Amino acid sequence: MRQPPQIRLRERMTIVGNLDASSFVPWIRRHAAKLGLSQDIAHTGPDRIELEVAGPEELIDMMEMGCSLGPIDVWVDTIERRPIDD
């Protein structure tokens, strides 16, 4: 039985908190790759990281959850997600 095709979404994710971008950005890239998501980092700073992610909604949800728990050296306060229209 064939699985229905998964709908790919594109979203901008804004992560706010006490972020060590030098360790968190590589962590984000590895986590996205493990989930099979495409990603593009748009902004990095000590208190905000913005990225665009694309993939199935369930995997983007998993990416958000992973980022909210994050590596030990960051503290994520909020994550905002907005759809990106083609």
Image: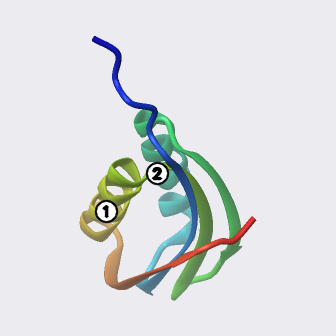
Is disc 2 surrounded by few (<14), some (14 to 19) or many (20+) residues within 10 Å? some
Image quarter of residue 35: top left
Q: Is residue 65 left or right of residue 12?
A: left
Q: Residue at x 65, y 71 (%)?
A: 84
> How far across and how far down the image is residue 81, in percent?
47, 78
Residue underneath mark 1: 70
Q: Tags 1 and 2 in contact by the CB under 8 Å rule?
A: yes
> How far across and how far down the image is residue 17, in percent?
40, 87
Q: Is residue 8 left or right of residue 67?
A: right
> How far across and how far down the image is residue 80, in percent?
44, 83
Residue 63 to residue 17: above or below: above
Could you say whether the residue bearing mark 2 is in a helix, strand or loop? helix
> How far across and how far down the image is residue 63, in percent?
37, 56
Q: Image quadrant for the C terminus?
A: bottom right
Q: Which of the marked residues, 1 or 2, is nearer the chain's N terminus? A: 2
Residue 38 to residue 13: above or below: above
Amino acid marked by disc 1: Gly
Q: Residue at x 27, y 11 (%)?
A: 1
Q: Residue furthest top?
A: 1
Q: Residue at x 62, y 52 (%)?
A: 39
Cα–Cα span, label 1 and label 2: 8 Å
Front-most of 58 and 71?
Answer: 58
Image quarter of residue 48: bottom right
Front-most of 74 and 86?
Answer: 86
Residue underneath mark 2: 27
Q: Residue at x 45, y 32 (%)?
A: 5
Front-most of 44 and 73?
Answer: 44
Amino acid marked by disc 2: Trp
Image quarter of residue 41: bottom right
Could you say whether the residue bearing mark 1 is in a helix, strand or loop? loop
